[in-house]
Amino acid sequence: MIFIRNLIVILKSPAHEARLQQVQKEIEASGIYQLTETELIYGAKLAWRNSSRCIGRIQWSKLQDLNYDDGL
């Protein structure tokens, strides 16, 4: 939930507020929730940015999503 709240604070849109409510309902119903593609990409960038031992982390904002699901 902290991850989703941080994302919503950054993006600040009504759609993201609705997403927070959806996540809360999913957690209450099943104990887990599925990340959206946007959340997954943001999480990967955030993890790379916060990786203090990674010499290449200065490039964290340039991380690109290469989705090969369509080609399979």
Image (cartoon, rainbow, N blue to C red):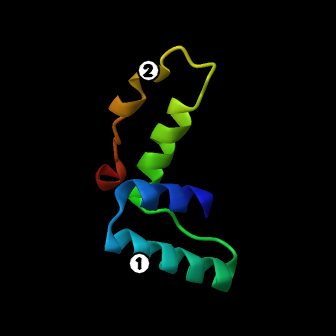
Identify the mark nearer the N-term, 1 or 2: 1
Residue 32: image x %, image y %? 65, 71
Q: Residue furthest right?
A: 31
In-front residue for pair 66/44? 44
Label 2: how many Cα within 10 Å (few below 14, some 14–19, many 20+): few
Residue 25: image x %, image y %? 57, 83
Q: Is residue 11 left or right of residue 57?
A: left
Q: Identify residue type, mark 1.
A: Ala
Task: Please name the residue shown 52% across and 32% down the image.
Answer: 48
Q: Is residue 69 left or right of residue 55?
A: left
Q: Residue furthest top?
A: 55
Quadrant position of the N terminus in the picture: bottom right
Disc 1 to disc 2, C-alpha distance: 32 Å
Mark 1 sits on what residue? 18
Task: Please name the residue shown 50% across and 47% down the image.
Answer: 43
Residue 4: image x %, image y %? 52, 61
Residue 39: image x %, image y %? 45, 56
Compared to residue 13, the image places residue 54 above or below, namely above
- Res. 11 image quadrant: bottom left
Mark 2 sits on what residue? 58
